Image: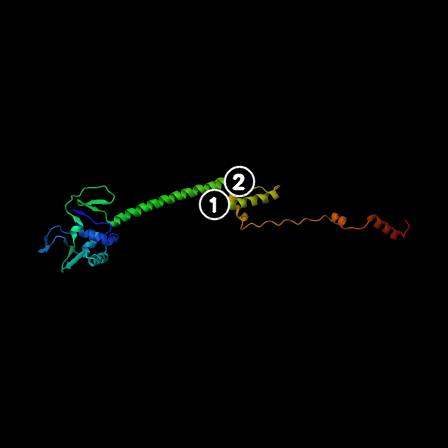
């Protein structure tokens, strides 16, 4: 017996309805039988919602909802007694091929159960797709992280090469390197230039701090948004030059006048 349900079947993408209908096809009689003195015809089987729930893994409410959909669309009909329910799969011959013997297969979309070849349920296919998508996503994420880590390290190496005091390189953590990368290489380069320019103004006593100190936190004060350019000191005027520039009289003549006043003109 082989069960055939095409992918264009109207309930194919509804997992619960598909599972229930497939379950009904698996359990339907292929010939007339008797059950507790009652004739059960081909295309029928005896069960209950509670039993179907236990056999399919669906909740009783899910079974009830799925059954209603199948009944409303004419695929299944039911007849209940005080002890059990007879389920009839309408036109079951469309979905069950009794002329082929099932063979074990390794095809991705088939499986063998109780000697019967059948397509995997939709939920199984969906699980496989989800699993594949998850693996691809994880692989893509891993590749992206590796690529980012490489870019971060290359950025740090370029910055480190520009710094004069190359001490403490191993003390710059991956987290700090990532922070430098996120701030931007050009922005850090500008901060480095400002720092070195400041050092050059007092080079007689100021020396570059360790590279680890600068790249862990020392650069912060020299970033675009934090840096305040020192005010240039105003040039001081030489007092002697001021007098020399501003006087418009002869000191020798002035001295002569003072002497004349002091000695009454007898010089």
Q: Residue furthest right?
A: 266
What number of labels is visible? 2
> Residue 119 appears at what percent x and percent y?
22, 47
Identify the colour scheme used.
rainbow
On the rendered structure, is 188 left or right of 202? Answer: left
On the rendered structure, is 55 left or right of 234? Answer: left
Distance from disc 2 to disc 1, alpha carbons, whole Å, reads 15 Å
User: What label sits on residue 247 in the rendered view?
Assistant: none
Q: Residue furthest left?
A: 37
> Residue 259 appears at what percent x and percent y?
87, 50
Residue positioned 44% across, 41% down in the render: 150
* Number of residues whose C-alpha sits closer than 10 Å to that of mark 1, classed few (under 14), some (14–19) or many (20 or more): many
> Looking at the image, do the residues carrying marks 2 and 1 touch, with CB atoms under 8 Å apart?
no
Q: Nearer the viewer, residue 137 or 219?
A: 137
On the rendered structure, is 192 left or right of 255? Answer: left
Q: Is residue 147 visible?
A: yes
In this figure, which residue is indicated by the disc labeled 2? 162
Badge 2 or badge 1: first in the primary sequence? 2
Q: Residue furthest bottom?
A: 82
Q: Is residue 167 visible?
A: no
Task: Report helix, strand or loop for mark 1.
Answer: helix
* Number of residues whose C-alpha sits closer than 10 Å to that of mark 2, classed few (under 14), some (14–19) or many (20 or more): few
Task: Report helix, strand or loop for mark 2.
Answer: helix
User: What label sits on residue 181 in the rendered view?
Assistant: 1
> Residue 247 appears at what percent x and percent y?
78, 50
> Residue 138 appears at what percent x and percent y?
35, 45
């Amino acid at each position: 017996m082989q069960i055939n349900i095409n992918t264009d079947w109207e309930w194919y993408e509804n997992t619960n309805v598909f599972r229930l209908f497939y379950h009904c096809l698996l359990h339907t009689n292929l010939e007339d039988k008797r059950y507790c003195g009652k004739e059960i015809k081909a295309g029928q089987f005896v069960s209950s919602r509670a039993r179907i729930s236990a056999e399919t893994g669906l909740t009783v409410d899910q079974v009830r909802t799925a059954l209603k959909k199948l009944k409303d669309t004419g695929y299944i009909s039911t007849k209940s007694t005080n002890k059990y329910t007879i389920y009839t799969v309408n036109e079951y011959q469309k979905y069950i091929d009794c002329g082929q013997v099932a063979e074990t297969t390794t095809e991705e979309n088939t499986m063998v159960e109780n000697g019967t070849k059948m397509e995997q349920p939709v939920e199984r296919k969906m699980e496989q797709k989800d699993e594949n998508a998850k693996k691809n996503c994880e692989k893509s994420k891993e590749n992206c992280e590796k690529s980012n880590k490489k870019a971060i390290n290359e950025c740090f190496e370029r910055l480190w090469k520009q710094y004069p005091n190359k001490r403490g390189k191993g003390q710059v953590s991956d987290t700090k390197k990532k922070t430098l990368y996120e701030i931007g290489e050009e922005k850090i380069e500008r901060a480095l230039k400002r720092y070195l320019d400041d050092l050059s103004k007092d080079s007689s006593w100021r020396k570059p701090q360790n590279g680890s100190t600068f790249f862990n936190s020392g650069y912060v004060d020299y970033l675009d948004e934090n840096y305040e350019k020192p005010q240039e000191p105003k040039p001081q005027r030489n007092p002697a030059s001021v007098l020399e520039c501003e006087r418009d009289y002869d000191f020798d003549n002035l001295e002569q006048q003072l002497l004349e006043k002091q000695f009454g003109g007898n010089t």
